[in-house]
Image: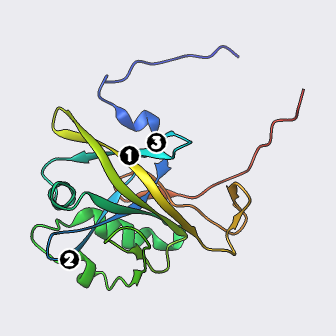
Amino acid sequence: MEQVYVSLDPNEYHVLHPRPAYLIVTSDREGRLNVMAASWVMPVNDEPFILSLALDKETKTYQNLLEVGEFTVNVMGEEHAGLVYQAGSLSGKSVDKWKLLRLEPAPSKFVKPPGVKGSYGFVECRVERMIDVESVALVLARSLAVHVRQDLYEKYSWNLGRARILMHMRGRVFVGPGKVTVVPKT
């Protein structure tokens, strides 16, 4: 059967979804915590581990990163879909999301913002630089520490039979990992 392609609007970025849905935790100068949902996060270098985060410049998270320059990236599971959706639907400028969502801190070793207790794991990050891209800042950050739940992570990888990593499609639609395919050596 012949493959047929259709053209979409060139701004249809959802063609690159689903993507893992994370919670980003920041703090302001006074130590007040904020949390936001983000799926536009990716590693850009492995040694040292540098990651990028695309962040709207109108957010409380962006403001906190300008002030403090540290954050955690929290890996969430399917059971956290409602929490992640709520964190992404509210503005930290108008409400204390940390308190409203009843989040508990998981202690960090090197940065002020904590991880989220109950997450699958979290990465402690320090901002290296920010690049303006239209209405977004591309944040490049260095990993200072990585913490994972021992029961969900094996050497170099999540155990996807137990760690049901939350993926965001669009709006209220989330999915989990499906079948794992391992390509044989040739």
Provide the secondary structure element on which disc 3 rests: loop
Provide the secondary structure element on which disc 2 rests: loop
In the displayed structure image, the side of residue 27 where residue 77 appears, left or right: right
Question: Which label was assigned to residue 73?
Answer: none
Q: Nearer the viewer, residue 18 or 113?
A: 113
| Quarter containing the N terminus | top right
In three-dimensional space, the C-alpha distance between marks 2 and 1, rounded to whole angstroms, equals 25 Å
Residue wearing tag 3: 17
Q: Residue at the top extreme?
A: 2
Q: Tell me: residue 139, above or below residue 157.
A: above
Q: Nearer the viewer, residue 38 or 14?
A: 38
Q: Looking at the image, which residue is at 55% across and 70% down?
A: 120
Provide the secondary structure element on which disc 1 rests: loop
How crowded pointer 2 is (Cα within 10 Å; few <14, some 14-19, many 20+) is rated as few
How crowded pointer 1 is (Cα within 10 Å; few <14, some 14-19, many 20+) is rated as some
Residue wearing tag 2: 31
Q: Looking at the image, which residue is at 24% across and 64% down?
A: 89
**Residue 148: quarter of image:** bottom right
Q: Nearer the viewer, residue 175 or 137?
A: 137
Q: Are marks 3 and 2 in contact (CB under 8 Å)?
A: no
Of marks 2 and 1, which one's residue comes earlier in the chain? 2
How crowded pointer 3 is (Cα within 10 Å; few <14, some 14-19, many 20+) is rated as few
Give the amino acid type for the residue marked by disc 2 in the picture: Gly
Q: Position of residue 53 (x, y in %)?
A: 35, 46
Question: Which label was assigned to residue 40?
Answer: 1
Q: Looking at the image, which residue is at 62% across and 55% down?
A: 177
In the displayed structure image, the side of residue 183 where residue 40 appears, left or right: left
In three-dimensional space, the C-alpha distance between marks 1 and 3, rounded to whole angstroms, equals 10 Å
